[in-house]
Image: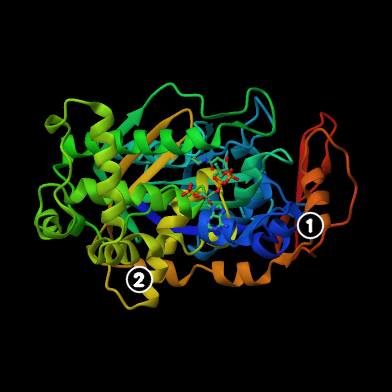
Amino acid sequence: MNSVGIDAVAIHAGKLRLDLAETFAPAKGEDPEKYTKGLGLHASSFPDVEEDIVTMGANAAHKLMTRKGLEPDDIGRIDVATESAFDNSKPVSTYIAGCLEAVFEGDFHHANKGERKFACISGTQSLDDAYNWIRAGRNRGRAALVIATDTALYARGDAGEATQGAGAVAMLIAEDPDLVELSLEQGFGSADETDFLKPNQQFPSVDGKRSVQVYLARMREALEDYESVAGDVRAEDFVYAPFHTPFPGMVRKAALLAYRHVTRDTEIEDSLAARIGRQPRAEAFDDEDAFFESVREYMDALKETEQYQEWYEQAIEPTLDIARHVGNWYTGSVHIARASALRNARENGIDMAGESLLVGSYGSGAQAEIHAETVRENWTEEIDALDIDDQLAARRDISFEEYEEIHDVHNHDKEIDIDAFTTPSEEFIRDGLGPMDERTYRYVE
Ligand code: COA
């Protein structure tokens, strides 16, 4: 069996931009640095009036299929991962297939379609499903289309409003892929948690501080589980570590823990010992609180070391470049982090062919998953084809009043009729409701 992984990727960002430091923070009476320094965010992308999870997903998939010269017959499976679905029965993948059939010759009648739900980790779970389907030999030579699409909006006034975003990532999963091969080994950390949920409601109920703790705990479990099958992970084993990025500050916390873990019992720990001591070991403490306090002190000191800062700048910071300007895309977030890292490698002339990524996905509720990816020979072509910079630059900036309007437009409980802020061109848009109240779409030339 050839290797299986991501053959191509295309991204569609919501077409509006809310500047968090200059527009949002002043309107909320907050210090802009809470966003730029604390959360690590400059802007959020928002869906325009005629955009939603279907149009963003279809636009990303359309771009991907056009670029790769694919027709519907080449696709045997369409999986959509989302936590922003507006229909409890009909999957988003059928709406997206309908959109694509309007512009491509042929149809997807023999493609298996579905929708995956497990908060933000369902994008990675859909990759898994596609991988397993191909490895099992059930794909009849066809590829799978995985689309992670979300409008990550929180109720007005909720703390989560600081970390909103909207966009879609489409990925083609195939044998002998051009971008990255997925490892057979993977590790999970999963537990029944209530850090973030939407019990039949559009906007999440979220315990933000708790979700940060749950993210860290599950991620650690997943890493240990991964190591139980793949062997110990060391800092030099991977060039980048793209992690789920609800906001870059979250990844900053995870990275410090990860670095402590991957340097334990290594020459790096030895070389740091003279300056900051050795890592505290639980067995050396009678009292759990004293152990945790000692770990906190070690981490504070570790954060200040040159070794850690250099590693962070090289392995983590580049994964956050796009997230800083678009906010949280839920299911798409870790897939943006991968693209961001590889784009950075391309810009800096780093030869990634054959090199590894350590990929950490997370979904509230809660589950983390860790796997490795090996970058393929043709990766540069795939990364050069990304048009994310142009998309981000073309976004329409919105004022705080316009933000309030657009939030209302996408609020299922409100009926607001306003004109779109941007003029659509060569893209799918929402154009109303059908006889059964289903959303309808069309392609604008
Ligand atoms: N300068 C620099 N840093 C500042 C600052 C300033 N003026 N003001 C605040 N900060 C820092 C805070 O210290 C904090 O960093 P820390 O966590 O390292 O201490 C960070 O900015 C955020 O500030 P905080 O007051 O905690 O923000 P908040 O109460 O608005 O909550 C979230 C932040 C992330 C919890 C909230 O936006 C949320 O609930 N988001 C949705 C859930 C989520 O994304 N969970 C993540 C796991 S999936």
Q: Which label lies toward us, 1 or 2?
A: 1
Using the image as rendered, state which of residue 441 and residue 371 is in the foreground.
371
Identify the residue at horizontal 32%, vertical 61% (top origin). Answer: 312
Quadrant (top left/top right/bottom left/bottom right) for the C terminus: bottom right
Quadrant (top left/top right/bottom left/bottom right) for the N terminus: top left
Tell me where residue 255 appears, x and y as whole percent: 34, 51
Tell me where residue 155 appears, x and y as whole percent: 71, 38
Label 2 belongs to which residue? Answer: 345
- How many discs mark residues in the rendered view? 2
Label 1 belongs to which residue? Answer: 400
In this rendering, position of residue 344 left or right of residue 69: left
Q: Which element is circle 1 on?
A: helix
Query: Residue farthest to the right?
Result: 417
Identify the residue at horizontal 79%, vertical 61% (top origin). Answer: 399
In this view of the protein, can residue 440 be seen by the observer? yes
3D distance between C-alphas at marks 1 and 2: 36 Å
Q: Which element is circle 2 on?
A: helix
